[in-house]
Amino acid sequence: MDVAISILERLGQAALGLLLNPFYYLSILIVMWNMRRQIFFERKLYHSRLHTWLGDGMRSVIAGLVAGIAGSLVMSVAGVSLQPSAIVYLWVGALLLALIRVRFICFAYTIGLIGIVHTALSWWPEPDRTAEWYAWIEPIARLHVPSLIALVGVVHMVEALLVRLQGAHLSTPLFVESKRGKLIGSYQFQGLWPVPFILLTPAAMDGPALPFTPLFGGEAMWSAGWTFAALPVMIGFTNMTATMLPEQKVRRSSLQLFLYGLIVTALAFASEWLPELVLPASLLTIVLHEAIIWFERRDESLRSPLYVHSGKGLTVLAVLPDSVAKSMGIRPGEVIHKVNQQPVRTKEQLHQALRQNPAFARLEVIDHNGEHRFVQSALFEGEHHQLGIILSPDDDAQYYVKIRKYELFRRWKATLGRRHDEVRYEQRPTIPG
């Protein structure tokens, strides 16, 4: 009974600390700002919006809260904890790595490097503890690296869950330029979730002992006492596809993230039991993360673009919510073959066929399996001029997304000599004729 009361009291203190933590509220504001930015570009590209900043933003906040509770339970049982010095090294290391590549800000790289440095320090002969430089490396030497590696694994499994549940809904259709200079349709996945973790942490505190011994650390780490500490984390997912349906891409990406998290967590447990495995586990934390990125890029490059028009008709890139096309069951990637019995191969032919009967539309659609089906609906005044269908781009598209290179710190241009990707929206001049 005393243990249950103590757990509830310390959980309440950690929850209060989370409510008073400005970084958690800052992460929520970033989510809302990112959603408004996404809607701005949707309106610029399509003169309509596919998302709502408040509704979709709050769904991301709630999903992050639920995912944080689930991840906290897993990490508390395992005994995943962070020393205060570890938090400092994580953020400083992530910011330094961001100077090389922005995507290196992921903790997988920072913790992997910390594990490598930790192992290297264990190979050194006994250092001079009175030296000034020793104060900088002593915290790394005392870190519990298996616990940090487990944190990487659990966070990525939580990310996989969030991507699987909300990734497709948060995707945005885009016009992009292919390697051959032709405009094609694409989907960008850009999800942000504020995830509050509450970690069981060893601390010198009076009170009852834990009713169980966590898997990491053993009796030596947890015998002095324990408490809970709040750790707000921002989890982000960014990806693009021009060759798959949004649901297909999300399933593949979430599965890869989950398998990565599972493997890394297993490596953390193995290195806890066999300290000799800390170095291989740290290296694999980095290598496997890079392997996921390489595999996705290679897989995308080997596939043919999906969102391009063909001789069979006009390919659907996206469908607006609450539109006639949505009620008809038209889906991205399908081809509009005929409208009101008229073949359509251009936007002009589509508009002309729809004007033949302003009160009714009958479409012949080729689905993802190459089969033809017919859909129809009555039309009312004020309906979208294309029934709510966003078509794949043609050469007359005014706006498209261009991948540009930008410098993270311009004044370091001559020193670093590296550039990074940034998505910008540019106006494309109409091609005469």
Image: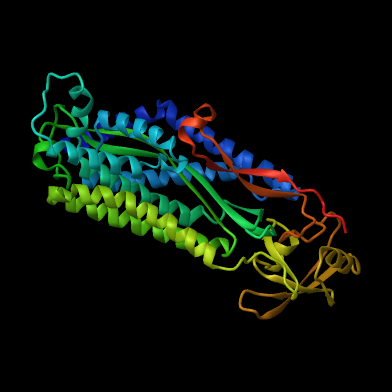
Q: Which quadrant is the C terminus positioned in?
A: bottom right
Choose top left, top right, bottom left or bottom right for residue 20: top left
Q: Residue at x 13, y 47 (%)?
A: 275
Q: Residue at x 30, y 56 (%)?
A: 262
> Which residue is farthest bottom?
371
Give above or below for 256 relative to 314.
Answer: above
Choose top left, top right, bottom left or bottom right for residue 126: top left
Q: Which quadrant is the N terminus positioned in?
A: top left
**Residue 59 vs residue 399: left or right?**
left
Colouring chosen for the image of the structure:
rainbow
Q: Residue 385, position in %: x, y?
A: 82, 58
Q: Nearest the camera: 94 or 3?
A: 94
Q: Residue at x 75, y 62 (%)?
A: 324
Choose top left, top right, bottom left or bottom right for residue 360: bottom right
Q: Residue at x 43, y 29 (%)?
A: 23
Give above or below for 245 relative to 413.
Answer: below
Q: Nearest the camera: 84 or 182?
A: 182
Question: Total of numbered circles in the picture?
Answer: 0
> Which residue is farthest right?
356
Question: Is there any visible trace of residue 261 in the rendered image?
Answer: yes
**Residue 213 vs residue 382: left or right?**
left
**Residue 96 vs residue 31: left or right?**
left
Q: Nearest the camera: 350 or 22?
A: 350
Question: Is there any visible trace of residue 80 in the rendered image?
Answer: no
Q: Residue 248, position in %: x, y?
A: 52, 65
**Residue 397 vs residue 167: left or right?**
right
